[in-house]
Image (tube, rainbow, N blue to C red):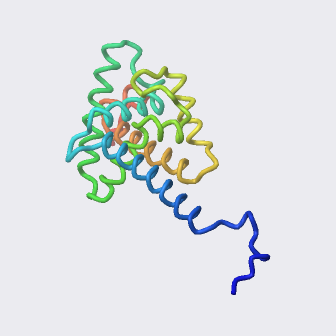
Amino acid sequence: MVDRSIDHPLQPKRRWFLKTALAIGAVGSALGALVYWHRGMNGSKLTEHGREVIRGLTIGYVGPMLPKDAAEREATLSTHLQNVETMLNGMPGVLQVELSALIGLLGNYPTRKMLTGMGASWASATDDEIAQALETMRLNPLPSTRLTYQVMRGVILLSFFSNSTNWHLTGYPGPVQI
C-alpha cells in the first residue's frame, strides 16, 4: 500500500512531466521547422535569408572598412557574398550543414531575438542595431551564443581578408616584394 502522507505537493507527477515534455517537443519542432524553412544554404547556394544574414554580419564586422560610396559599398558586399558562398562550398559537408543551421538561426525572428536581442531583420536594421546585436552575442553569458558569434566572425573575416581586392580598403598594401 502507498503511503500518501509522504507525497509532496511540489513533487512533479507523471502527467505533468508528460505534458511538459510534449510542450517542449512541440516548441523545439516548431523552431526546427523555422530554421529549416529559413536555412542559410540550399544545396550549394546561399538562400535569400542566408544572403541577408551574411550581408548584415559583414556590415557589423567590417563596416568601417567598407567604402563610403553607396554603389562601391554594394559592389563590395555583393562580391563578398559570392566569396563567402565559394568558401562555404569548399568546406566539408558536415560544416556546411552546421553553418547553414547557424545562419538559419540568425535569419529567423524568434531565434535571432534570443541570440542577438535584435527585433529587426538584418536587411532593415541600422548599422547601430547590427553593432548592438553583435555586441550582445559577444558578451552573452551562454557559451553557445558566444561560440556562434565567434564562428560567424571567423567565416566573415576569413572570406573578407583573403580576397586581395579588399586589402586596399583595410590599408594593407599587400605582400612586400623581396
How many labels, in total?
0
Residue 177 is situated, as x and y percent measured from the top left of the image, at 32, 39
- Quadrant location of the N terminus? bottom right
Q: Nearer the viewer, residue 16 or 61?
A: 16
- Dividing the picture into quadrants, the one containing residue 133 is top right
Q: Position of residue 152 (x, y in %)?
A: 43, 44
- Please report the residue visible at 37 percent of the width from the left and 43 percent of the height from the top: 34
Q: Is residue 172 left or right of residue 11?
A: left
Seen in the picture, residue 138 relative to 6 is either above or below; the reply is above
Q: As displayed, is residue 21 above or below residue 121?
A: below
Q: Position of residue 19 (x, y in %)?
A: 53, 59
For the point 23% across and 44% down, the residue is 42
Residue extending farthest to the right is 5
Front-most of residues 10 and 1: 1
Residue at 57% from the left image edge and 42% from the top image edge: 138
Residue 31: % across, % down: 42, 46
Q: State the residue lying farthest toward the front.
A: 1
Foreground: 113 or 28?
28
Q: Residue at x 47, y 25 (%)?
A: 120
49 left or right of 114 in image: left
**Is residue 164 toward the left or the right of residue 45 in the image?**
right
- The quarter of the image holding the C terminus is top left
Q: Residue furthest bottom?
A: 1
